[in-house]
Image (spheres, rainbow, N blue to C red):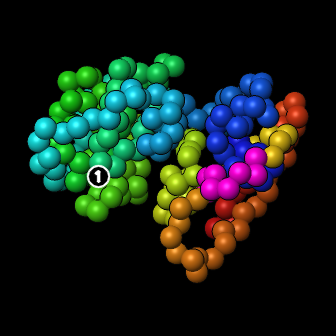
Amino acid sequence: MIASLDGRIDCNMTEQIEGGDEYYEALEQLSCPSMLMGRVTMQMHYALPERFVATDTTPIGAEAYYVAHKTDAYCIGVDTEGKLQWGEHEFDGQALLVITSEQCPKCYHDRLTKQDISWIATGKKGIDLTRAMEILYTKFGVERLAVTGGGHINGAFLEAGLLDEVSFMVAPGIDGRAGMAAAFDGIANPNRSATRLHLIGVFQLGQTVWMRYKFDN
């Protein structure tokens, strides 16, 4: 993740204060061929502007998956209810893969299949991230994955205990606007304990500071 000094991650804002390729240089060094993003981030950067509207709302109702392309690199979008529409089946050399819950309409998965887009459906009440990661590993061969936002999907992975490392870049600027998402956000439990990390490296890329942390456990 890349953020302002106050931890905000709005992409339009970070592009104003970090105008180079530092983020992508760091991502390349992490050797994560596949990336995963939440629905809002995918809508902002990859999906078509029009929302998908199901003509038949019957849910897929059971865990399932479809492998359109077996590849070394996936662009993975988390879209619980199946709202995003796609004009392409790959981006920047990464095959698109969409993860939904089992409550997502089956017609949405049928649309993805017709478009040659891989998908996973898992979780009765929202996406089961642990099972989704297991399926990514066993059925799609994903061994190393970068979770690249937004704040709520990062928070969901943190809450599920699915992160091995945090790679966090601080760009030279301040946001300060009220209500902007932080790098980790959206965890509902107000009594949840803070997560301790172990610093393993600090690097400077231009005017940006890049820090890498491992989890204490």
Q: Is residue 93 magenta?
A: no
Q: Observer-nearest residue: 30 or 20? A: 20
Q: Amino acid at mark 1?
A: Ser
Q: Is residue 172 visible?
A: yes
Considering only vertical position in the picture, is 101 above or below 66? Answer: below
Mark 1 element type: loop
The region drawn magenta spans: 175-184
How many numbered marks have been drawn onto this rendered protein structure? 1
Hey, which quadrant is residue 142 in on the image? top left
| Structural crowding at the residue carrying mark 1, measured as other residues with C-alpha within 10 Å and reported as few (<14), some (14–19) or many (≥20) | many
Identity of the residue furthest to the front in this view: 178
- Give the residue number, with chain letter if any, for mark 1: 101
User: Whole-percent x and y of residue 113?
Assistant: 22, 28
- Please indicate, yes or no, whether residue 142 appears anywhere in the rendered image: no
Q: Quadrant of the C terminus?
A: bottom right
Q: Please report the residue visible at 80 percent of the width from the left and 40 percent of the height from the top.
A: 171
x, y percent for residue 71 = 41, 25
In the image, what residue occupies the spot 30% across and 27% down? 117
Residue 186 at x, y = what percent?
53, 61
The image quarter in which residue 4 lies: top right
Depth check, front residue: 170 or 10:
10
Q: Estimate the x, y position of residue 34 in percent, counting from the top left.
A: 51, 34
Looking at the rendering, which quadrant does residue 78 occupy? Answer: top left
Query: What type of secondary structure mainly makes up the magenta span?
Result: loop
Q: Residue at x 74, y 25 (%)?
A: 21
Q: Is residue 70 above or below residue 176?
A: above
Q: Residue at the location (76% across, 61% down)?
A: 198
178 in magenta:
yes
Farthest bottom residue? Answer: 191
| Quarter of the image where the N terminus is located | top right
